[in-house]
Amino acid sequence: MKLAKSLLELLKKKDKMGTQETPAGMCPNCWGTQEYSGKFYEAYKNYDADVKTHNPNIGWVQDYANKHLAGIALHPHVEGQVCEHCKVVYKPEK
């Protein structure tokens, strides 16, 4: 019962406090979400948890393929195609 009374008193006080105006340029719906310790911070999207990635539009699958599969791709060579990882040359079939 004591909890219910304290909630009612809080709600009555809140009505007497009035409303605060949103500062110019701030979204009234999101007011207070970018405020921390009285300072405003710009919101940004963190696309990738890896801070070493310079392009945030690369997904994790593409990033994994670039890191682990690029080394086994066949590259053109004088005698055919060569794997840079194991140095095996694949000659074209005749």
Image: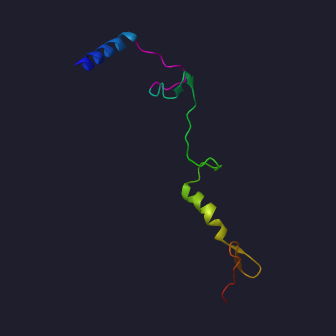
User: For the point 53% across and 26% down, which residue is it?
Assistant: 36
Residue 33 image position (x, y, % from top left): 48, 28
| Magenta run includes residue 37 | no
Q: Quadrant of residue 87?
A: bottom right
Residue 22 image position (x, y, % from top left): 49, 19
Residue 42 image position (x, y, % from top left): 58, 31
| In-front residue for pair 28/18 | 18
Q: Is residue 13 left or right of residue 86?
A: left
User: For the point 29% across and 16% down, which residue is it?
Assistant: 6
Residue 65 image position (x, y, % from top left): 59, 62
Q: Can you say whether 10 is above or below 40 in the image?
A: above
Residue farthest to the front, as pictured: 2
Q: Is residue 68 left or right of residue 79?
A: left
| In-front residue for pair 94/55 | 55
- Image quadrant occupied by the C terminus: bottom right
Secondary structure that dominates the magenta span = loop
User: For the point 58% across and 60% down, which residue is it?
Assistant: 64
User: For the point 42% across and 15% down, which residue is it?
Assistant: 19
- Image quadrant occupied by the N terminus: top left
Q: Can you say whether 60 is above or below 86 in the image?
A: above
Q: Can you say whether 3 is above or below 48 in the image?
A: above
Q: Quadrant of residue 40?
A: top right
Q: Which residues are magenta?
A: 18-28
Residue farthest to the top, as pictured: 16
| In-front residue for pair 6/28 | 6
